[in-house]
Amino acid sequence: MSLSVSKKACVGCGLCVRACPQSALRVENKTLVIDGGRCVLCGECVRACPQSALAIRRERARVHEAGGGIWVFAQRGSQGLLPVALELCACARRLADQSGARVCALLPADSPDEARRLIDAGADCVFTCQSPYLHETLDEPYADWVCALAAQHRPDILLFGATLFGRQLAPRVAARLHTGLTADCTALSTCAETGLLHQTRPAFGGNLMATIITPAHRPQMATVRPGVMPLPEGGAPRRGEIVPTEGPKGPGRVHILSRTPRGQGAGIEKAEVIFSAGRGIGTRKTLERLFELAERAGAQVGVSRPLCDMGWAGREHQIGQTGTSVRPRVLVAFGISGAIQHLAGMTGAKTVIAVNQDPEAPIFGAAQYKLVADAQETIEQLLQSMQ
């Protein structure tokens, strides 16, 4: 979409300038000038114009034919490839084996070792890029790079991890490519008859699972939650090609002036054992005691969303639909009722032990071992037993 002005109808009255909340309009020599970088297409200027000289034009979506295969954006962190990149490659490989498509990974670095890991995980081709503009995780230069490659090679499917950065980058790419995007998917499959990507995600507060398709536009885009797809199984090394590509032309409009580290995250995505807490623990002091218990047991701490909303724990500890999906070997849930939004993030847990004083708590339906008891007392008893 774009904002357009009729030069014949515009009289340069300036009412639209005063109505614009983004300061995206100005009048020069009785001619209206639009700053496309500031305009967010809110429509306030259109409504304010007495001459009906302004209009928001909807461009026809650009559809391209398939043929470029299945693409995976391989996000990197401070320690290299994120696990979700390998999970998505393995998922793309399974989808490609059904359709005969090619799997390509987009690696924003010149790292042969990481490219080899992506190939072993399922990629047939890895597009690499060594650019100073990709050293920081900023939306614009990454979108420039991804969209330029997509315009050249025309992928049929483009997948991103539903990380903090992936959730920022994927919508920008989808908007530029004039296609749809399904966010926070928990399952992906292809239809044998149509070949369309079936993108499944929780909907209506997690009360049902919706399967979404993109029938007319390409690429079909989705973000996938880290941890919901299995990591690739080890096997014989695969063959694949590594293709260097040109980077973005500039850094974009945002520049990072400084950084203040907030410390190491909890790392619950990779945790083998998680002690998870909900409102049933009662007090913030009990949560602090749970952190002590987890440290002694070599476990990580997860929490439900209400505890984050109250400021008792950081978002890096949150498990659930709007938090992190985890796949621990053992998850012990203290005082968690079992809302479906929270359960959506712990479906990958192999063994669930639930502690709740309500014998009818929904969490017991997802647990293999159930203890009807007060969470505070149970935590204290476990701490005493470990002294």
Image (spheres, helix red, strand yellow):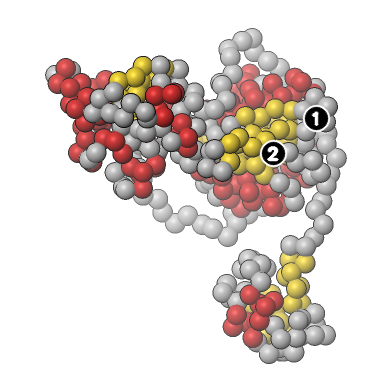
- Disc 2 residue type? Ile
Classify mark 1: helix, strand or loop.
loop
In the image: residue 140, left or right of residue 379: right
Residue name at image x 74 percent, y 77 percent:
54
Q: Is residue 100 visible?
A: yes
- Residue at (75% x, 89% y) in the render: 11
Furthest residue toward right? 65
Please provide percent x and percent y for residue 334.
30, 29
Residue 75, position in %: x, y?
Answer: 57, 36
The residue at which mark 1 appears reads as: 195
| Extreme residue toward the top, this view | 236
Residue at x 33% of width, y 36% of height: 278
Give the x, y percent position of residue 362.
Answer: 41, 29
Q: Quadrant of residue 267?
A: top left
Above or below, 301 against 217 in this view is above
Mark 1 vs mark 2, foreground winner is 2
Q: In the image, residue 239 lies at what x, y percent?
A: 71, 17
Alpha carbon of mark 1 to alpha carbon of mark 2: how far? 13 Å
Label placed on residue 11: none
Q: Quadrant of the C terminus?
A: top left
In this picture, residue 372 sits left or right of residue 250 = left
> Who's the residue at 75% across and 51% down the image?
178
Could you tell me the amino acid type at mark 1? Gly
Position of the N terminus by quadrant:
bottom right
Residue density around tag 2, few if under 14, some if 14–19, many if 20 or more, within 10 Å: some
Helix or strand or loop: what does disc 2 sit on? strand
- Of 335 and 142, which appears nearest the observer? 335
Is 74 rendered above or below residue 166? above
Task: Report which residue position mark 2 lands on.
Answer: 212
Residue 103 in view here: no
